[in-house]
Amino acid sequence: MTELSEASADEQPTGLQGTRLTTIAGPHDVRAVPTGQLAALAQDIRTFLIEKVCASGGHLGPNLGVVELTIALHRVFDSPRDAILFDTGHQAYVHKILTGRAADFDRLRQAGGLSGYPSRAESMHDWCENSHASTSLSYADGLAKANELRGRQGRSVVAVIGDGAMTGGMAWEALNNIGAGRRPVVIVLNDNGRSYAPTTGALAHHLHTLKHPGDHTHIADGRTASDLFTRLGFTYLGPVDGHDTGALQNVLDQARALRRPVLVHALTVKGWGFGPAEGDEADCLHAVGTVDAVTGKPAPTAGPPAASWTSVFGQALLELADAREDLVAVTASMLRPTGLYPMAVKYPERVFDVGIAEQHAVTSAAGLAMGGFHPIVALYSTFLTRAVDQVLMDVALHRLPVTFVLDRAGITGPDGPSHHGMWDTSLLGMVPGLRIAVPRDGGQLRSLLREATDHEAGPTAVRFPKGTAGPGLQTVRRAGSVDILSESGIRDVLLVSYGPLASMCLQAAAQLTEQGIGVSVADPRWATPAAPELLELAARHRLVVTVEDNSRTGGLGSTLAQHLADNAIATPIRTLGLPRAFLPHGPREQLLADAGLSARQIVHAVLRARAGKSHVRITPSDGSPR
């Protein structure tokens, strides 16, 4: 990344000219800003964030809420000598600006550009880049122990964690360890009362009492012992106004000087300084696409917007809930993003938001199933990976009827490696008795969700990607549970399409047919277990090629290959999918193409396989090797 200090005034990108940001090349410059200019610096940062994030998309509300807090952190602590960790990383944009990366915001979340989360490849000031919540305190505990073992004197470790992320189980495991030690760990609790939605549970109630003191709470300097954090071994400082840089700096100076575990309770407002975001009860401005920098509203589109996968699911679930009183829903602080909000409005007593606690969500759903209900656990695919043990041992071992609905499966795009949902079928495919459905369009999502909730013999999962559900694809015929989307009298190649890549497979089939190759396209609908009819289709073709938006390693294609081998079916099989790698951020279509998943590349893979060449080298249309 290019530091601002390397650019002349004439070369400064739009948004920097005429602001104090042109003088900020790193934390040393932040510490040099006169106290009287800090409010103006904060305003410059807010103006810059609104302009850049509204233009490119990204996390707006969380970053507007931590401007003063981040300035104070970099004035008190010496990054990177003092490690500053952000949990979750979507509130680190201000940190990026203050560590010399403002010039790179024109390419925020674009392929090859600035990551929307901390990135160790970008800067020495970014210690960790995993944007899954509730992890920063454990990182901090380990770093403090490492400093002690190495004899690194005078260093601090700081973890900035939201009250929403503090509801996660890992955070409490770390508190248990940090509070029992004497190491200099400063936890900054950024309390804005919400994550995607208002924070739930007993912790939210406790924080409310700390913000509104009564006869049996704390006093400002933390000398009483009635707050939970003091009882866990921390010095509690606060609450402090999270939008008062001077007050924050004073309390952080105290925390640093104590050289022991300290919790600083900072009160902030998500979206502070931008009216549409401050009053955003629906949290539409938590993460945005391209929006108007004045109103915060998306640009108008021609005609009605296409239905998203999430909205199709939400409506389908509500219809099922209308018909079945035994359907309940569970989510982990993602009521609106996963589509549960319509059901929560109509049946609030049957929808449970457990906070950022995926493990608890899954096992709580197991308890609901034991009690005679059919739970829907709605999560992003990437976050279910945090609860695989619970899926395996708490749900599947007991053969409980729990349906997991996994939004944002496969390539998600600009959020990058921590948010791609590309491992769920590899992990869930190992779970005995669990059935996985992969709908190709909105109509199939409705059908498969109904089939999943009708299944009472064990767990099920339904996965779908981010974005528009797209038009329905017609079938030629149904073979058992398998949809035949295209069929040739010449049984050369069977393309097995898992889910929303079906249209891509149909395009490839049409191109291969023009070359005289007989191609059939099958959509299994239920990816596991492999249907007998799918095995029969494979046995009648000369080559099988599977296409999936999941890791090839342990994915649906490899599962089908194992089924073919187990049934002594000798038809060669080639699996196309995502590589065994952490994929960068970028447009979904581009990342799929980079992995060999486009109609043209499927055609090329088939031709190579028919020629007996197992290693497919993809050459883009511009002639450059990929």
Image: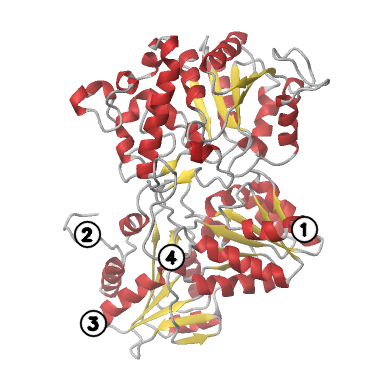
Q: What residue do we see at 55% from left, 43% from top?
A: 280
Disc 2 from disc 1: Cα separation: 51 Å
**Mark closer to the observer (2, 1):** 1
User: How dense is the environment of label 2, judged by Cα within 10 Å: few (below 14), some, or many (20 and up)?
Assistant: some
Residue at left offset 46%, top offset 14%: 75
Q: Nearer the viewer, mark 2 or mark 4?
A: 4
Q: Secondary structure at mark 1?
A: helix
Q: CA distance from mark 1 to mark 3?
A: 54 Å
Q: Nearer the viewer, residue 87 or 33?
A: 33
Q: Position of residue 454 (x, y in %)?
A: 68, 73
Badge 4 amino acid: Pro
Task: Name the spot of residue 381 as percent of width and height, x first.
Answer: 54, 54
Mark 4 → mark 3, Cα distance in angstroms: 36 Å
- Looking at the image, which is closer to me, 148 or 372? 372
Amino acid carrying mark 2 in the image? Pro
The residue indicated by pointer 1 is 368
User: To which quarter of the image does residue 264 belong?
Assistant: top right
Q: Which mark is residue 304?
A: 4
Residue kind at label 1, given as amino acid type: Leu
Residue 514: numbered disc: 3
Q: Give the residue type at disc 3.
A: Glu
Task: State the separation of the CA atoms marked 2 and 4.
Answer: 35 Å
Q: Is 249 rendered above or below residue 422?
A: above
Q: Is residue 115 visible?
A: no
